[in-house]
Image (tube, helix red, strand yellow):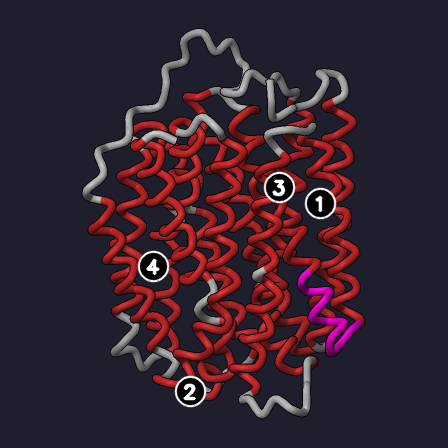
Amino acid sequence: MNREEKKIIGLTTASHALIHLFEGILPPILPLVMAQFGTDYFTMGVIISVFSYAFGLGSLPAGLLSDRIGPRRLVTVFLFGAGLAGVLVLPVNSLLLYGVLMGLMGAFCSTYHPAANTMISLGIRQKGKAFGLHGIAGSLGVAVVPALSAWIGTLMGWRAPHVCFGLTGIAIGLFSLTLPRFPQTASRAAENGAGAGGASVSRPALVFFFLSATALGLSYKGIMTFLPTYMGRNVNFAFLNIDVVALGGAFATGALIFGAFGQYIAGRLTDRFKVERLYLAAIALGTVFVFIMAVSAGAVLVLASMGYAFFYFSVQPIQNFMVSAYLPRHRQGLGYGILFILTFGVGSTAAAVSGYLADHYGLQAVFYAMGFCFLASTGMALGLLLQSRGTGGLHGRR
């Protein structure tokens, strides 16, 4: 990579890890916040949905803005805006105000993914590797936040993780200002309807792709909302004398760290093999592990969670690569906006629905429901693979 590419990777990887710290602040400290405000799982699921709807629904306008004003500016907006929202949680004593701040944080976070992925798609030559590195940073953020948020929360109170992550965002925002404005996206000339990677894809194939991504977004939000609590209750090793909040966060972190390995391996494979086939295999294998999580406890649950994390997160660099190749350069931001409004926006519905399931049928029911979301995604991915046969499919190396 040249110097400019390294700067892009530096900014996007740091920001990607941080955005998943923001996203994952609340689930590990649910018991603390519920005790503070005397509320239930459903209400907390609604607050998480408020964040997630804002996070997802802002992705489409963010994608359009990325195509118009350049993506680096939007990354900076995310860092300062979400960082400030986190710091403002410090004086909050109202559940309603807390929900408003979480929604505001989600809205600023929504600018990140379409902008960052557009920067990588247009500014990095080895896209598969770059999406893999970017994904690893995000996976590490997802993996670390259950233990980190739980640890900070139990040590200094439930507000402290918000403030710590907020200050980090402001610091990275200052760094982002040292980067030059990213160039405008390419003009429409000479693209002839093909993707930036030269791929030609049918409309039914795009429909299958986006429907599959939507189902995965539902499964992700449902599982991640309750994974720390579920593991805290179902992974009990007598020799570990640890508070249930910290225990659940620690085991969730240990399992989710395997998502980084999935991101790395998938990023390497997308530069070498037929991408639609990799996509189907990753989702199908992930489905198996989610259902095992629903029926297991103890060490088996930990191992199944590792398998889920590996295969779920391996999907993300594959999806990002596919958008970069399926859509023309002047529509890269729009493509990522659509992808993330579906995965994070529509997918947010699963937080409140999962809260209802947890209250009425137990936490185990959440994982059964999310397993069926994985099954639906597998079916859509199979449809995408069959559709791609007419054009020979998408290969990383051309």
- Give the left or right position of residue 388, taking residue 105 as reference: right
Residue depicted at 52% across the width and 36% down the height: 129
Q: Nearer the viewer, mark 4 or mark 1?
A: 1
Which disc number belongs to residue 36? Answer: 2
Q: Which of disc 1 and disc 4 is earlier in sequence?
A: 4
> How much space separates mark 1 and mark 2, taking CA atoms?
40 Å
Q: Is residue 54 in sight in this rendering?
A: yes
Q: Amino acid at mark 1?
A: Ala
**Do the residues under discs 1 and 3 have CB atoms within 8 angstroms?**
yes
| Magenta stretch contains residue 190 | no
SS category of the residue bearing label 3: helix
Seen in the picture, residue 203 relative to 292 is either above or below; the reply is above
Residue depicted at 64% across the width and 49% down the height: 216
Which range is magenta?
296-306
Q: Which of disc 3 and disc 1 is earlier in sequence?
A: 3
Residue depicted at 67% across the width and 41% down the height: 212
Q: Amino acid at mark 2?
A: Gln
Q: Amino acid at mark 4?
A: Leu
